[in-house]
Protein backbone atom coordinates (compact mmCIF):
# COMPACT_ATOMS: atom_id res chain seq x y z
CA UNK A 1 0.00 0.00 0.00
CA UNK A 2 2.86 2.41 0.76
CA UNK A 3 4.32 1.78 -2.70
CA UNK A 4 0.96 2.52 -4.33
CA UNK A 5 0.49 5.72 -2.30
CA UNK A 6 3.94 7.01 -3.22
CA UNK A 7 3.49 6.14 -6.89
CA UNK A 8 0.10 7.89 -6.98
CA UNK A 9 1.62 10.99 -5.38
CA UNK A 10 4.37 11.19 -8.01
CA UNK A 11 1.85 10.69 -10.83
CA UNK A 12 -0.49 13.39 -9.46
CA UNK A 13 2.38 15.89 -9.29
CA UNK A 14 3.29 15.14 -12.91
CA UNK A 15 -0.33 15.56 -14.01
CA UNK A 16 -0.61 18.88 -12.13
CA UNK A 17 2.42 20.20 -14.00
CA UNK A 18 0.91 19.22 -17.34
CA UNK A 19 -2.43 20.78 -16.47
CA UNK A 20 -0.78 24.02 -15.36
CA UNK A 21 0.91 24.40 -18.73
CA UNK A 22 -2.31 24.35 -20.72
CA UNK A 23 -5.83 25.10 -19.48
CA UNK A 24 -7.59 25.85 -22.78
CA UNK A 25 -11.20 24.76 -23.07
CA UNK A 26 -10.60 23.64 -26.67
CA UNK A 27 -9.06 20.29 -25.77
CA UNK A 28 -11.69 17.90 -27.07
CA UNK A 29 -10.71 14.36 -28.05
CA UNK A 30 -10.18 14.40 -31.81
CA UNK A 31 -11.34 11.88 -34.40
CA UNK A 32 -7.87 11.17 -35.75
CA UNK A 33 -5.25 8.46 -35.88
CA UNK A 34 -2.81 8.72 -32.98
CA UNK A 35 -0.01 6.71 -31.44
CA UNK A 36 0.36 6.91 -27.67
CA UNK A 37 2.45 5.98 -24.64
CA UNK A 38 0.98 5.12 -21.24
CA UNK A 39 2.35 4.92 -17.73
CA UNK A 40 0.12 3.91 -14.84
CA UNK A 41 -0.02 2.94 -11.19
CA UNK A 42 -2.56 0.43 -9.98
CA UNK A 43 -3.49 -1.96 -7.22
CA UNK A 44 -5.77 -4.85 -6.38
CA UNK A 45 -5.95 -8.60 -6.51
CA UNK A 46 -4.45 -11.35 -4.40
CA UNK A 47 -1.07 -11.36 -2.76
CA UNK A 48 0.70 -14.67 -2.13
CA UNK A 49 -1.98 -16.41 -0.03
CA UNK A 50 -3.49 -18.55 -2.86
CA UNK A 51 -0.04 -19.86 -3.87
CA UNK A 52 1.89 -22.76 -2.33
CA UNK A 53 5.00 -21.23 -0.73
CA UNK A 54 8.03 -23.39 -0.06
CA UNK A 55 8.90 -23.59 3.64
CA UNK A 56 12.63 -24.08 4.23
CA UNK A 57 12.02 -25.66 7.63
CA UNK A 58 10.54 -28.93 6.33
CA UNK A 59 10.74 -28.75 2.54
CA UNK A 60 6.95 -28.67 2.09
CA UNK A 61 4.61 -26.16 0.46
CA UNK A 62 1.96 -24.19 2.33
CA UNK A 63 -0.81 -21.92 1.09
CA UNK A 64 -2.73 -19.12 2.83
CA UNK A 65 0.50 -17.34 3.81
CA UNK A 66 0.71 -13.55 3.37
CA UNK A 67 4.31 -12.96 2.33
CA UNK A 68 5.47 -9.74 4.01
CA UNK A 69 8.96 -8.27 3.92
CA UNK A 70 10.52 -5.53 6.02
CA UNK A 71 13.24 -3.02 5.30
CA UNK A 72 14.75 0.24 6.54
CA UNK A 73 13.64 3.72 5.58
CA UNK A 74 16.62 5.81 4.57
CA UNK A 75 17.14 9.39 5.78
CA UNK A 76 14.11 9.64 8.08
CA UNK A 77 14.28 11.43 11.46
CA UNK A 78 15.10 9.20 14.41
CA UNK A 79 11.75 9.89 16.09
CA UNK A 80 9.82 8.33 13.15
CA UNK A 81 9.40 4.61 12.35
CA UNK A 82 12.67 3.31 10.93
CA UNK A 83 11.30 0.27 9.10
CA UNK A 84 8.58 -0.43 6.56
CA UNK A 85 6.60 -3.57 5.86
CA UNK A 86 5.05 -4.31 2.46
CA UNK A 87 3.55 -7.08 0.39
CA UNK A 88 2.75 -7.71 -3.28
CA UNK A 89 -0.47 -7.69 -5.36
CA UNK A 90 -1.27 -9.69 -8.48
CA UNK A 91 -3.11 -6.68 -9.93
CA UNK A 92 -0.33 -4.16 -9.27
CA UNK A 93 1.65 -2.00 -9.45
CA UNK A 94 3.41 -0.26 -12.37
CA UNK A 95 2.31 -0.47 -16.00
CA UNK A 96 3.87 0.75 -19.25
CA UNK A 97 2.24 0.50 -22.67
CA UNK A 98 2.38 1.78 -26.24
CA UNK A 99 -0.48 1.70 -28.71
CA UNK A 100 -2.56 3.31 -31.44
CA UNK A 101 -5.99 4.92 -31.67
CA UNK A 102 -8.04 4.60 -34.87
CA UNK A 103 -11.37 6.41 -35.57
CA UNK A 104 -14.05 3.91 -36.62
CA UNK A 105 -17.23 6.06 -36.62
CA UNK A 106 -18.48 9.43 -35.45
CA UNK A 107 -17.26 9.91 -31.85
CA UNK A 108 -16.03 6.28 -31.71
CA UNK A 109 -12.33 5.38 -31.52
CA UNK A 110 -10.73 1.93 -31.38
CA UNK A 111 -7.63 1.64 -29.20
CA UNK A 112 -5.07 -1.18 -29.15
CA UNK A 113 -2.16 -1.26 -26.69
CA UNK A 114 0.69 -3.60 -25.79
CA UNK A 115 2.47 -3.25 -22.48
CA UNK A 116 4.14 -4.66 -19.40
CA UNK A 117 2.76 -4.84 -15.84
CA UNK A 118 4.58 -5.79 -12.66
CA UNK A 119 4.63 -5.52 -8.89
CA UNK A 120 7.60 -6.43 -6.73
CA UNK A 121 8.42 -6.32 -3.03
CA UNK A 122 11.87 -6.94 -1.60
CA UNK A 123 13.58 -6.48 1.74
CA UNK A 124 14.60 -8.33 4.90
CA UNK A 125 13.08 -11.69 5.80
CA UNK A 126 11.10 -11.65 9.04
CA UNK A 127 11.83 -15.27 10.04
CA UNK A 128 15.02 -14.54 11.97
CA UNK A 129 17.33 -16.00 9.31
CA UNK A 130 19.01 -12.69 8.59
CA UNK A 131 18.36 -13.20 4.89
CA UNK A 132 16.83 -11.14 2.12
CA UNK A 133 13.75 -11.90 0.08
CA UNK A 134 11.66 -10.77 -2.86
CA UNK A 135 8.38 -11.63 -4.57
CA UNK A 136 7.31 -10.40 -7.99
CA UNK A 137 4.33 -10.68 -10.35
CA UNK A 138 4.98 -9.86 -14.01
CA UNK A 139 3.22 -10.24 -17.36
CA UNK A 140 2.80 -8.71 -20.80
CA UNK A 141 -0.57 -7.08 -21.55
CA UNK A 142 -2.75 -6.47 -24.60
CA UNK A 143 -5.73 -4.12 -24.26
CA UNK A 144 -8.41 -3.64 -26.95
CA UNK A 145 -10.89 -0.84 -26.19
CA UNK A 146 -13.70 1.01 -27.97
CA UNK A 147 -14.09 4.60 -26.74
CA UNK A 148 -16.96 7.06 -27.08
CA UNK A 149 -15.66 10.63 -27.22
CA UNK A 150 -17.63 13.58 -25.88
CA UNK A 151 -15.65 16.79 -25.62
CA UNK A 152 -12.80 16.43 -23.18
CA UNK A 153 -14.34 13.22 -21.79
CA UNK A 154 -14.43 9.69 -23.13
CA UNK A 155 -15.60 6.30 -21.87
CA UNK A 156 -14.40 2.95 -23.15
CA UNK A 157 -15.25 -0.74 -22.86
CA UNK A 158 -13.12 -3.62 -24.01
CA UNK A 159 -11.03 -6.65 -23.25
CA UNK A 160 -7.69 -7.36 -21.62
CA UNK A 161 -5.35 -10.22 -22.44
CA UNK A 162 -2.40 -11.04 -20.15
CA UNK A 163 0.39 -13.06 -21.72
CA UNK A 164 2.67 -15.41 -19.77
CA UNK A 165 1.83 -14.29 -16.22
CA UNK A 166 4.50 -15.41 -13.78
CA UNK A 167 5.41 -14.96 -10.14
CA UNK A 168 8.93 -15.17 -8.71
CA UNK A 169 9.81 -15.96 -5.10
CA UNK A 170 13.43 -15.57 -3.98
CA UNK A 171 14.99 -15.94 -0.53
CA UNK A 172 18.72 -15.96 0.12
CA UNK A 173 21.46 -15.60 2.71
CA UNK A 174 25.06 -16.80 2.97
CA UNK A 175 23.91 -20.34 3.89
CA UNK A 176 20.99 -20.83 1.47
CA UNK A 177 19.39 -19.73 -1.78
CA UNK A 178 15.74 -20.46 -2.62
CA UNK A 179 14.10 -19.65 -5.97
CA UNK A 180 10.55 -20.57 -7.01
CA UNK A 181 8.88 -19.61 -10.29
CA UNK A 182 5.07 -19.86 -10.59
CA UNK A 183 3.50 -20.34 -14.02
CA UNK A 184 -0.03 -19.32 -15.03
CA UNK A 185 -2.10 -19.71 -18.18
CA UNK A 186 -2.72 -16.60 -20.24
CA UNK A 187 -5.54 -14.54 -18.74
CA UNK A 188 -8.56 -13.03 -20.52
CA UNK A 189 -10.60 -10.31 -18.83
CA UNK A 190 -12.79 -7.25 -19.32
CA UNK A 191 -12.04 -3.56 -18.79
CA UNK A 192 -13.84 -0.24 -18.46
CA UNK A 193 -12.06 3.11 -18.64
CA UNK A 194 -12.77 6.83 -18.28
CA UNK A 195 -10.36 9.46 -19.68
CA UNK A 196 -10.21 13.23 -19.28
CA UNK A 197 -8.14 15.45 -21.59
CA UNK A 198 -5.80 17.67 -19.55
CA UNK A 199 -3.69 19.10 -22.40
CA UNK A 200 -3.39 18.98 -26.18
CA UNK A 201 -1.57 15.62 -26.16
CA UNK A 202 -2.19 14.30 -22.66
CA UNK A 203 -5.08 12.68 -20.84
CA UNK A 204 -5.66 11.19 -17.42
CA UNK A 205 -7.53 7.90 -17.18
CA UNK A 206 -9.11 5.68 -14.55
CA UNK A 207 -9.41 2.02 -15.52
CA UNK A 208 -10.91 -1.05 -13.87
CA UNK A 209 -9.87 -4.49 -15.13
CA UNK A 210 -11.53 -7.78 -14.19
CA UNK A 211 -8.93 -10.57 -14.41
CA UNK A 212 -7.94 -13.91 -12.88
CA UNK A 213 -5.17 -16.44 -13.53
CA UNK A 214 -5.36 -20.23 -13.81
CA UNK A 215 -2.42 -21.84 -12.01
CA UNK A 216 -0.32 -24.14 -14.20
CA UNK A 217 2.55 -25.23 -11.94
CA UNK A 218 5.82 -24.24 -10.29
CA UNK A 219 9.54 -24.87 -10.32
CA UNK A 220 11.71 -24.62 -7.18
CA UNK A 221 15.49 -24.68 -6.77
CA UNK A 222 16.78 -24.76 -3.19
CA UNK A 223 20.48 -24.72 -2.26
CA UNK A 224 21.85 -25.24 1.24
CA UNK A 225 25.63 -25.15 1.19
CA UNK A 226 26.62 -27.47 -1.67
CA UNK A 227 23.39 -29.46 -1.58
CA UNK A 228 20.88 -28.55 -4.27
CA UNK A 229 17.32 -29.84 -4.69
CA UNK A 230 14.95 -29.17 -7.60
CA UNK A 231 11.16 -29.54 -7.66
CA UNK A 232 8.92 -29.34 -10.71
CA UNK A 233 5.23 -29.58 -9.80
CA UNK A 234 2.16 -29.36 -12.05
CA UNK A 235 -1.15 -28.14 -10.67
CA UNK A 236 -3.66 -31.03 -10.63
CA UNK A 237 -6.73 -29.71 -8.77
CA UNK A 238 -8.39 -26.38 -7.94
CA UNK A 239 -6.21 -24.71 -10.57
CA UNK A 240 -8.83 -22.55 -12.32
CA UNK A 241 -8.97 -18.87 -11.42
CA UNK A 242 -6.66 -19.49 -8.47
CA UNK A 243 -5.29 -15.95 -8.37
CA UNK A 244 -7.49 -12.84 -8.45
CA UNK A 245 -5.72 -10.16 -10.53
CA UNK A 246 -8.47 -7.49 -10.58
CA UNK A 247 -7.07 -3.97 -10.61
CA UNK A 248 -7.97 -0.29 -10.44
CA UNK A 249 -5.50 1.93 -12.29
CA UNK A 250 -4.73 5.60 -12.80
CA UNK A 251 -3.06 6.15 -16.17
CA UNK A 252 -1.27 9.07 -17.79
CA UNK A 253 -1.48 8.87 -21.61
CA UNK A 254 0.60 10.95 -24.03
CA UNK A 255 -0.33 11.03 -27.75
CA UNK A 256 1.92 11.90 -30.66
Image (tube, rainbow, N blue to C red):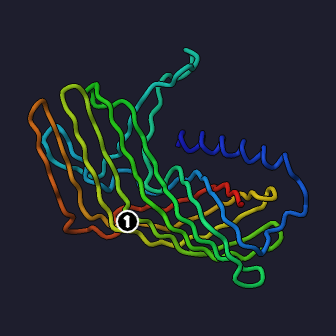
Give the residue at the far right of this rendering.
25
In which quadrant is the C terminus drawn? bottom right
- The residue lying toward the viewer, choosing from 132 and 113, is 113
Q: Residue at x 81, y 59 (%)?
A: 200
Residue 2: x and y, percent? Answer: 54, 39
Position of residue 33 in the picture relative to residue 6 (left or right): right
Residue 89: x and y, percent? Answer: 44, 51
Give the residue at the far bottom of this rendering.
105
Give the residue at the far left of this rendering.
227
Position of residue 93 in the picture relative to residue 202 (left or right): left
Q: Residue at x 61, y 53 (%)?
A: 39
Q: Residue at x 51, y 70 (%)?
A: 160
In the image, residue 160 sits, relative to residue 249, either above or below, namely: below
Sort mark 1 into few (<14), some (14-19) or many (20+) by Cα contacts within 10 Å.
Answer: many
- The residue lying toward the viewer, choosing from 63 and 18, is 18
In the image, residue 110 sits, relative to residue 95, either above or below, namely: below
Q: Which residue is mark 1?
A: 213
Amino acid sequence: MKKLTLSLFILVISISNVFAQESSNKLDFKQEFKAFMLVGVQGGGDGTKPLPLYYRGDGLYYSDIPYTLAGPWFGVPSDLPQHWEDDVEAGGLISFAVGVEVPVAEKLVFSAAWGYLYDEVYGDLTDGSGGKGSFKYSRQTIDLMLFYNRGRHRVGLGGAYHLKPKAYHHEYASAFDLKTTYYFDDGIGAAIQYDYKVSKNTSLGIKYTKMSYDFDGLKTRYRVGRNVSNNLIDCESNCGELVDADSLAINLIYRF
